[in-house]
Amino acid sequence: MRFQAMSDAPEIGRLFRRDGAVAWSLLAFLTSYTAWAWGGVRPSFHVVGVAVSVVLLAVVIVSGGGARQRWRRDPVMYLGAAFLGFLALQWANAGREQYFDVGFQRWMYTPPRWRNWPSAFSRDEARQMLAWFFPAWVIVTSIRTRLLPRRALRALLRFLVFNAAALAVFGVVQFVSGTAAIYWVQPLKEPFFASFGYGNHAAPFFVLAAALAAGLLYREAFDAAGEYGMDVSRFRLRHPGRMAGLFSALLLCLLGANLGLSRTGVILAAVLALFTAGYGWVRGWAVLEAAGRVNLAALTLAAAASLFFLVAGFGQKGLEREFAPKPVEAGTLLSTGERIQLELGYRPVFARAAISAWLEQPWFGLGGWGFKYRVADHVPRNLWPALETRGWANVHVDFLQFLAEFGVVGFGLLAGSGAWMLAEWFQPRCRRHALWVMSLAGGVLLGRFSLVDIPFRSPAILYMGAVILAAVSQVCTSRSQSTSRARGVLLERNGL
C-alpha cells in the first residue's frame, strides 16, 4: 500500500499531464465560447467551435497513457460517429427545390438526388446539424477516454458553474440597463437574457447550471471527506472560499433562470430550489449538531429571501406579463379547449404535425430543419400566419423534432449514445452522492423542459449537458478503499 501512495503523489501534486491540460483548456474554451456567443445558435459563430473540436480530437488521438486505446474501444464513440455519418449523408443529399404543382394545386418539393437515402431540404441547414453535434461528440468522447483525472473533471464542472454565474451577472447588468438590444448591439423584439436571444433557452441553461452548482456545493459539504476516509466535520471547511463561490453561483444561476422570463423556466427553477433546500436539509440534519442546524436554517432563509427579492426587484413586471392570460381580440369567445391551446401556444397541434411529418419519411427523417418545410401541410390554415411570426420552424418538443428530422435511424443512434452513458450512472460502483443526485435532478428538469420547448436546439445547453453526462459518472465512481485513503492523506498534507 505504501508503494501505491508514493506512486500517486506526483499525480496529486499536479493537476494533470500536458495532454490533459491542453484537453481541459480546449473543453473549457469550447463550452464557454459557445455559451457567450449567442448560446451557439448563430451559424456564423460555428466555425470556431468546430475548429476547436478538431484540435481537441487530434489531442485525444495522439495522446498516450491508454487514452487513444480507450477512445478506439468506446461504443459511444462508434454510435456518435455513425450518427455524424448519417448527418453527413443528409447534408450530401440535400438541395430539394420548391415548386407549384398545377395538377394538385399545391406547393411541393423536388425529390432528393438519391432517392431512399437520408436527405435534407437545405444544404446549409443540414450543415448546421454537423456543426452542432460534431463538437458534442468530441466533448463526450474526449472525456470518456479518461485523459482527464477526476480532479480535472471536477475543476471542469466548477468552471461550467462559474462561467454560467458570470453569464448571469452579464445578463442582470444588461437587463437592468433596459436595453432592447442583446449585447447592446443587436435589437430584438422578443425578450432576451444574457447571450440567449430566446428566453426558453436561457432558463434551462441556468437551471442545469444551478443544479450542477448545488451538487458541487453539497459534495464539498457532505461527501468529499468520505471519499478519502476523512472526518466530515474537519474536511467540510477546508475550502470555505470555494463553497462561498459555489453558493453565490447557485443563487446567480437561479436568478438567471427566472429573468429569462419563461413560464416553464420559472416553475422549474422553483422546483429545483425547493429540491435543493430539501436535500440539503436531509443531508445536513444527519451530520450537524444543534448549532449547525440553526446556522443551516438561517442560511436557507437568507438565501430564499435574497433570491425572492432579487427576482421580484428585477423581473416583477416581466414575470407578470409572462404569467398573464394571452390576449384575444375583443368580442372573441373561446371554448375551454381553445383557451388551453392558446395558452400552450398551440403546442399540441404542432406536436401532432411533427408526428404526421415524421411518418412521411419515418426511417431517415426530413433532414436538419426539415420540419419547417412540411409543417404547413399538417396544421389548419388559420395557423399559417403563425408559421412566419412565432418561430414554428421548431416543434417545441425536442424529441419529436429530432424524430421528424432524423427518423428512426438517426434518432436511434442519438438516443442510443445518451442511453449508454446514462446507464453508467446506475452501475453499482457509481456512488449516489450529492453531485450525482443534483446532476440527475438537473437532467430530469431539462428533460421535462424539452417536452414543451427546444432546449437542445441550443448548443450551449447541448454541450454543458454533454460534459455533465460524460463526466459525473466518472467523478462519482468509487475507488478502491486503499487508494482512497492514500489520496486522502496526500490531500490533507497538501491542503487540497
Image (spheres, rainbow, N blue to C red):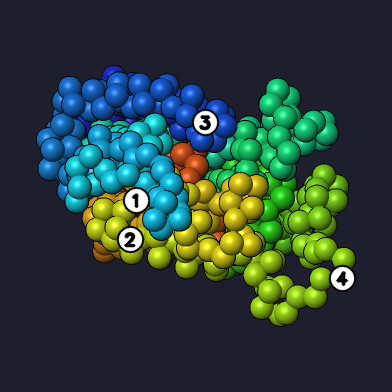
Q: Which mark is drawn over residue 366? A: 1
Element class at badge 4:
loop
Q: Is residue 349 left or right of residue 325?
A: left
Identity of the residue furthest to the front in this view: 103
Query: On residue 42, which mark appears?
Result: 3
Task: Tell me whether the residue at label 3 lies in contact with that at label 4, contact meaning CB atoms closer than 8 angstroms.
Answer: no
Real-space CA distance between mark 3 and mark 2, rounded to the nearest whole angstrom: 29 Å
Assess whether mark 3 and mark 1 are in contact (beta carbons under 8 angstroms): no
Mark 1 packing: few (<14 Cα in 10 Å), some, or many (20+)? many
Q: Which SS class for mark 3?
A: loop
- Give the amino acid type for the residue marked by disc 4 in the picture: Gly
Q: Which residue appears at 54% of the width and 39% of the height?
A: 161
Mark 1–mark 2 CB contact (< 8 Å): yes
Q: Nearer the viewer, mark 3 or mark 2?
A: 2
The residue tagged 4 is: 331
**Front disc: 4 or 1:** 4
Q: Amino acid under label 2?
A: Glu
